[in-house]
Image (cartoon, rainbow, N blue to C red):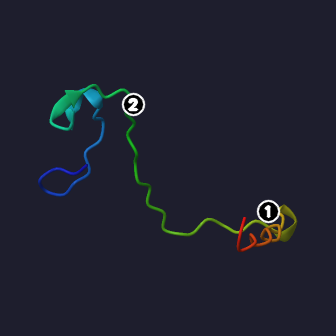
Amino acid sequence: MTDREGRHVQGMGRGDFDLFVDGKKVEIVNFSELAETATKEPAPTPPAEEAAPPAEAAPAPLPERW
């Protein structure tokens, strides 16, 4: 969420919002704040021995009539 000047607003909770479904106010039962993190450099690539194992082969295609 941003303010009128486009700055990110932090620290808001579910009590700061009203949620309406089909014109009726409903309770917000799950709320979490997501924050963007800016990184200047990409994460380092792990050495080959620490890299994830190769992906398994794709499953066989389904027959035309199943």
Q: Answer above or below: position of 47 versus 17.
A: below
Q: Could you give the CA–CA distance between mark 1 and mark 2, rounded to whole angstroms?
A: 34 Å
Name the element at disc 1.
loop
Q: Is residue 5 left or right of residue 45?
A: left
Q: Are marks 1 and 2 in contact (CB under 8 Å)?
A: no
Residue 54 percent coordinates (x, y):
82, 69
Please rate how many residues cluster around mark 1, counting C-alpha atoms within 10 Å: few if below 14, some from 14 to 19, many from 20: few
The one nearer the camera, 6 or 64, is: 64
Q: Is residue 25 left or right of residue 64?
A: left
Which amino acid does the dot numbered 2 rest on? Asn
Q: Answer above or below: position of 45 versus 32.
A: below
Q: Within the image, what quadrant is residue 10 found in?
A: top left
Residue topped by disc 2: 30
Q: Answer above or below: position of 41 versus 14.
A: below
Residue 45 percent coordinates (x, y):
71, 69
Q: Quadrant of the C terminus?
A: bottom right
The label number, if any, that marks residue 52 in the structure image: 1
Residue pictured at 83% horizontal, 62% vertical? 50
